[in-house]
């Protein structure tokens, strides 16, 4: 398990560390070893049987899912994966409960005393959308917005520490491999882009927001989210790392920023947690607040239209078994259509497949900036060794 390096990390007993390490290892085993075993079982047994019966191959993810559902290997894989997912959060909750008072004290101190000069703007009577408040997405107890005491930031800590266990090292030391890989890639690919203002939508604890400040230090960087406990934590976390980021409690469907006020509007792992109707509103808002000549970019799971039937099924697993109701509906949409409907010129559509800089190292990552983007069906967006990050967007 990866040990967080910033000052908000939780003090843990040896037993707690051992439990977290075990869960991380279990996740790596399920997502690397068992996943590749399941693919072999599919190729050797499930698909041939489907072909014998139907005289064709499965045409999409749902057909693969239906064909494999009764298979014992799939059931074992799924049971273990659901159990490991639950254990991620269960491994963090005891040290978090014990550390709550210190966590609040540290955050308050950081907010007052750090070198950075970021800000936090919360709204007292803010209405959190029901699609956030009514579910525990990916089985995370209390979800992003759960608040149990004044100035609570436990949900932010649960997410930060949970992500460290969940990602078994693939997200990097600061859990910002997505941000570092993508913000750095954009700087490399578009050396003339000199954004003055950058916005990150659905920023949660700001772990990927800060990377934009690292790669574009001259820019003013803003992050918005609906969840107050995550934003409190994000602010303290950014200050602990001396990154100047401005956090706001805001709904991305109705941004409180003027028209044409940002040069880059970014999001990561955000749209797949939002219902389709809201995605359309968010895309419209991204278009509205973007300056002419600015770039909108969403890092996301790759769309089903660009994956093989098996890989579409594989990624959609979360929708069926991990409390991610909006995941598959989002992945069934075509990103180019989403951009066009929001007002972007189809000729200005962009798509990138970016190697994780942490996994592949700088050389391979740099080379990708000169290659056409191609979705590698079993590595793109999949939390596994050799991960590639997918993103799409458009220039305004
Ligand atoms: C999966 S997390 C995003 C993670 C993060 N951006 C990253 O890079 O890993 C989804 C976040 O979106 C937020 N969210 C959901 N609906 C929103 C909305 N309409 N406006 C702003 N934030 C929203 C949630 O509170 C949550 O923090």
Image (tube, rainbow, N blue to C red):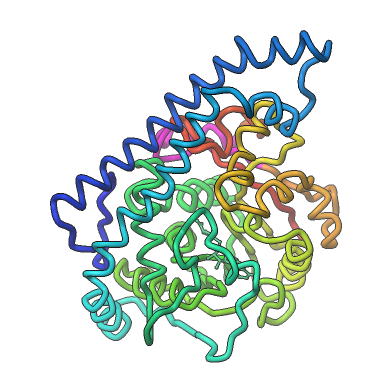
Q: Quadrant of residue 343?
A: bottom right
Magenta extent = 352-370
Is 183 magenta? The answer is: no
Look at 60% across and 9% down and name the residue there: 44
Ligand 1 image position (quadrant): bottom right
List x then y, in percent, for residue 381: 57, 39
Residue 114 shows up from this direction = no
Q: Residue furthest left?
A: 14
Look at 48% across and 77% down and name the residue there: 246
Q: Where 137 sits versus 358, above or below?
A: below
In the depicted view, which residue is nearer to us: 210 or 396?
Answer: 210
Lateral position of residue 214 relative to residue 226, left or right:
left
List x then y, in percent, for residue 210: 44, 63
In the depicted view, which residue is nearer to us: 146 or 212?
Answer: 146
Q: Quadrant of residue 96?
A: bottom left
Residue 376 shows up from this direction = yes
Q: Quadrant of residue 156?
A: bottom left
């Amino acid at each position: 398990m990866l040990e967080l390096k910033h000052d908000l990390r939780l003090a843990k007993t040896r037993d707690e560390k051992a439990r977290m390490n075990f869960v991380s290892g279990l996740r790596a085993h399920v997502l690397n070893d068992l996943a590749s075993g399941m693919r072999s079982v599919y190729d050797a047994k499930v698909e041939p049987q489907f072909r014998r019966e139907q005289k064709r191959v499965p045409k999409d993810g749902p057909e693969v899912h239906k064909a494999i559902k009764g298979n014992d290997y799939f059931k074992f894989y799924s049971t273990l994966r659901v159990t490991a997912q639950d254990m991620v959060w269960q491994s963090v909750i005891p040290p978090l409960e014990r550390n709550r008072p210190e966590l609040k004290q540290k955050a308050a101190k950081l907010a007052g005393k750090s070198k950075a000069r970021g800000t936090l703007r919360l709204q007292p009577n803010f209405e959190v959308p029901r699609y956030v408040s009514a579910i525990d997405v990916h089985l995370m107890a209390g979800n992003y917005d759960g608040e149990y005491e004044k100035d609570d930031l436990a949900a932010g800590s649960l997410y930060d520490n949970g992500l460290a266990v969940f990602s078994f090292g693939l997200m990097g030391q600061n859990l910002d491999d997505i941000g570092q890989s993508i913000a750095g890639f954009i700087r490399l690919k578009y050396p003339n882009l000199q954004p003055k203002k950058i916005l990150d939508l659905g920023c949660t604890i700001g772990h990927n927001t800060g990377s934009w400040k690292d790669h574009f230090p001259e820019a003013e960087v803003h992050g918005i989210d609906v969840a107050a406990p995550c934003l409190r934590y994000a602010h303290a976390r950014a200050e602990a790392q001396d990154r100047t980021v401005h956090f706001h409690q805001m709904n991305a469907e109705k941004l409180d920023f003027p028209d044409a006020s940002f040069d880059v509007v970014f999001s990561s792992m955000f749209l797949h947690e939002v219902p389709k109707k809201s995605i359309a509103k968010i895309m419209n808002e991204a278009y509205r607040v973007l300056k002419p000549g600015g770039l909108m970019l969403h890092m996301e799971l790759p769309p089903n239209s660009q994956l093989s039937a098996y890989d579409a099924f594989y990624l959609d697993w979360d929708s069926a078994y991990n409390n991610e109701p909006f995941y598959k509906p989002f992945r069934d949409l075509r990103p180019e259509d989403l951009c066009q409907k929001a007002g972007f010129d189809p000729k200005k559509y962009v798509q990138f497949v970016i190697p994780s800089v942490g996994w592949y190292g700088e050389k391979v990552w740099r080379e990708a900036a000169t290659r056409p983007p191609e979705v590698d069906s079993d590595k793109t967006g999949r939390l596994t060794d050799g991960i590639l990050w997918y993103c799409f967007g458009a220039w305004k």
